[in-house]
Image (tube, rainbow, N blue to C red):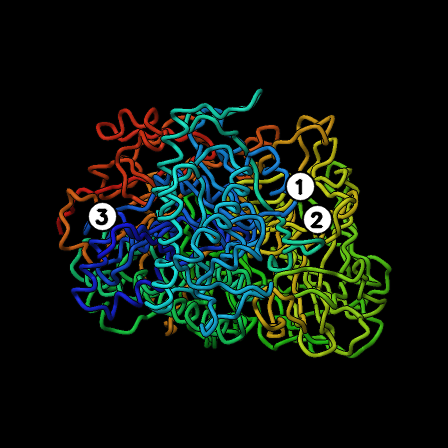
Amino acid sequence: MQDGRRKFIWEEMSYLERWWRDAADDMKESFINLVKNGQLEIVGGGWVMNDEANSHYFSIIEQLYKIVYDLDLLIIFGQLMYQMTEGNLWLNDSIGFVPKNSWAIDPFGYSPTMAYLLRRMGFDNMLIQRTHYELKKELAWHNNLEYIWRQSWDAEESTDIFVHMMPFYSYDIPHTCGPEPAICCEFDFARMPGSVYELCPWGTSPVEITPENVQEMALKLLDQYKKKSTLYRTNTLLVPLGDDFRYISIGEAEAQFRNYQLLFDYINSNPSLNTEVKFGTLEDYFQTLRDEADRINYTSSGEIGSGLVGGFPSLSGDFFTYADRQKDYWSGYYVSRPFFKAVDRVLEQTLRATEMMVALLLGFCRRSQCEKLSVGFSYKLAAARRNLALFQHHDGVTGTAKDHVVKDYGIRMHTSLQDLQIFMSKAIEALLGIRYEKLDQSVSRFEPELVRSKYDAQPMHRLVNIREGTYQTVIFFNPLEQTREEVVMIVVDSPDITVVDSNWTCVESQISPELKHHRTEIFTERHRVHWEVSVPPMGLQTYYIANGFVGCEKARPSQLKFFSRSNLIPCPAPYSCSKNYADVAEIENQHQKLTIDVKYGLLQKISFKDGSQNIVNEEIGMYSSSNSGAYLFKPDGDAQSIIGEGGQLLILEGLLMKEVYSYPMTVWENAPISHSTRIYNGDNTIQEFVIEKEYHVELLGDDFNDRELIVRYKTDIDNKRIFYSDLNGFQMSRRETYDKIPLQGNYYPMPSLAFLQGSNGQRFSVHSRQSLGVASLRDGWLEIMLDRRLLRDDGRGLGQGVMDNRVMNVVFHITVEANVSSISNLASGSLPFSPSLFSHCVGAHLNYPLHAFIAKKSQEVSVQPPPRYFSPLAAPLPCDLHIVNFKVPRPLKFLQQSPEDLRFALILHRRHWDSSYCRNGRSQCSNLANESVNLFTMFKGPAVSKTKAASLNLLHDDLEMLGLTDQFGDLAQEGHIDISPMEIQAYKLEFRPQLY
């Protein structure tokens, strides 16, 4: 503070919070003053610098959005999804500062989803670094390293955000002052002899600046600056000065500031050099650049620019897959540690459901007991928000952390999952009116149906024990905004059961043996009961599983067919079994028939009732990869099939679900994979049209060192090696396989969806419930990597291989759709296709499943409670309108806040869908968001009394800065909202109080 010329920026709030927690009051005051006077800028302000390939947009928004709103628990500056809200509120309320410049120097590739979300949060500028080295060369050649990033669907420039791309290999000091790292390293004064850092590897170390050498050194540094400046358009140049794990002592900072100031003073005092150099923040740089762009037109001939900042090109698209040199493509991290990528999604969906329940309790219950339960849970809710945010780190969800750090991530997420499930188990009692008293103090009467014994264990279905003459209560919560018709499954100890609904009306059900991954012992001696449920949007519904209930048919047993030529597997009681020696097996429902190659146990083709069919030719293979690591995918050649003839094949056929289970023959005694293929029968369900693939993966032991496991679907769709994969579950990106780059460079992130589309418009889609990597290496092929086990470090900073594989299940939902209008020239279009409305529904059902809760105690059949359900929406929302979240941002302060503060938040996303496919999406869809939705009448019971549109981080009510003003004319008075396709919009709400 004594020298106002010194400036500094800070990015990750998780580290700053740890310092702030123990800092003295006078230190905090000094810190605030530095921020206020512009010497210290908080850039990005996220809990972490998040990954952009594997993270789902919900986690990104919630980082950008949630953490700020719990700052009564933590003092942090922040603004980046789950990470980014807590800090923002504190900054805004305490010192009137909200970050508006993003600093993302270390994610391994960049997504336009991030640019969109930042823009809608009020950010003005972005800085990025890790993009393909050849792309940097191309952009630098045309002076396009600074540009306007525009979303591919945006025709009105409302999503434009200004971007600065760093030009060289790295963000460390040797690679930021200019093009010659050996010279730039001489100006990293923390590396002077005797320091704790390694000396410059190029042979010449930095020396203290003195009157004797200042001229030589200043001119040498200025030469680098001038060479770097030729890569950009303006006369304003940014030179970062820092690195990972730097500025750990006052002495280090003093060495940098002192020596650089001497160099700056020399340059600035010599007019002949025609240069002014000074320390600055990111805001200083962008403001200076924008001022210059206002004075001088830097537009190139024929260039499409933007009204946001003149003189720069507008670009669209993403920056995957990243390569830093030669053939080193960073596509391995799309799949590394896939078990924890799956846990990330489970925590995300559970947190979202919990946020909804907190909001429903505080908005609908309004009893003191409900308020105590919700407010008392605020601390654990904040911890869950932070733990999800933490894992979005670019070395977290990427799977590129050291083993002990991965374990820490896992334990944090596991702890939060347990906390959230306990709260939900109690919340359903209040929402259903079962009990209100002492909810915050007593043990819940329900428990989650899915349980995890420890942080790295697969979730298990809780066994429901039902004695003769009793029943068990099962409650389902639907976190989606439409009514859910769905076939569900619960594990029971006895096949002699009956299912009834909340009115005690009989429900058809199916009983099947539970299966496990084993060559000969594939039955667990437990049973799966399937039945179809109907659960209202954002609501609860009750069902009962009874043993000895008279008047209803018992669950119908599945028929079992063995295709193995051995007799190692006995038929489980009470099922009937048969042997079959055919070469192919088939299962079918009312819409499709699946043909299975019995020799290999793999899906061959899909046939439809109209006579059409699609070849699928499923293949399971492995890459040998002696040079791959956590970050890099560098296979030694093509993947080879690992499935031989033989193995175990079992078909279960029943009323509601049909399944083919395969434990394949491999060269290993214990196969690294087994898999199930399922289809469902239902009434008006999405599942009827879906093929469910579940792969059980055990890539354990030295036999699988330096192996990468994949599944391929070798279809007959003529996609010309063009396919589409999603970005953060928000938008699609067009991908094309190129011969000029290696195989690993043709792999792309697949957070939730990939599809092929043929010239006739036929579409083959694979939905995933976790992030993985995907490619289309040959015409008609879609390849997805499932797991990887690697001995070696790949030299990118981790310092170890990836050997901590866990047993895991990967679930895909596969669909085939026929377009009503054919696409004549697939290769001609550069813009990505959108999913169909049906595809959006499939993805929502997979990624936001029903949450099931089971009563801890059974009841006598003679005691039948009244109907119990909860339905908070007046009607299902339009099928293309998705509730990203419904929440109370600051539950701890809820009772202290005035209703004038609009204590609830609703975030909506209007999905864009391909209108050339079936309008109703095979989902009984009755309405779309073409007409406005009224927030005042959206809920039944307590009505919304006030509402206001806001930025996605809820910090800006002036929407002109976000380019959204035209959409909100009558919102405050009439509550009508109109959201354009692709847009995500946030609203602050308040409910009309209820009296009891």
Front-lying residue, 405 or 311: 311
Q: Which of the 4 image quarters holds residue 901? A: top left
Marks 1 and 3 sit apart, C-alpha to C-alpha, by 46 Å
Compared across the picture, whether 965 is left or right of 349 comes to: left
Q: Position of residue 634 (x, y in %)?
A: 72, 60
Q: Is residue 564 visible?
A: yes
- Mark drawn on residue 150: none
Q: Position of residue 122 (x, y in %)?
A: 34, 39
Specify which label sits upstream in the sequence, 1 or 3.
Answer: 3
Tell me what residue is drawn at x 55 percent, y 34 percent.
144
Front-lying residue, 943 or 970: 970
Q: Position of residue 493 (x, y in %)?
A: 53, 75
- Mark drawn on residue 37: 3
Q: Which residue is mark 1?
A: 735
Tell me what residue is drawn at x 52 percent, y 55 percent.
184
Q: Which of the 4 image quarters holds residue 242? A: bottom left
The quadrant in which the N terminus is found is bottom left
Q: Is residue 532 visible?
A: no
- Labels 1 & 2 near each other (Cβ < 8 A): yes
Residue 728 versus residue 196 in the image, above or below: above
Q: Which residue is mark 2?
A: 746
Specify which label sits upstream in the sequence, 3 or 2.
Answer: 3
Q: Secondary structure at mark 1?
A: strand
Crowding near the residue tagged with mark 1, few <14, some 14–19, many ≥20 C-alpha atoms within 10 Å: many
Q: Position of residue 48 (x, y in %)?
A: 41, 58
What amino acid type should be assigned to the residue bearing mark 3?
A: Asn
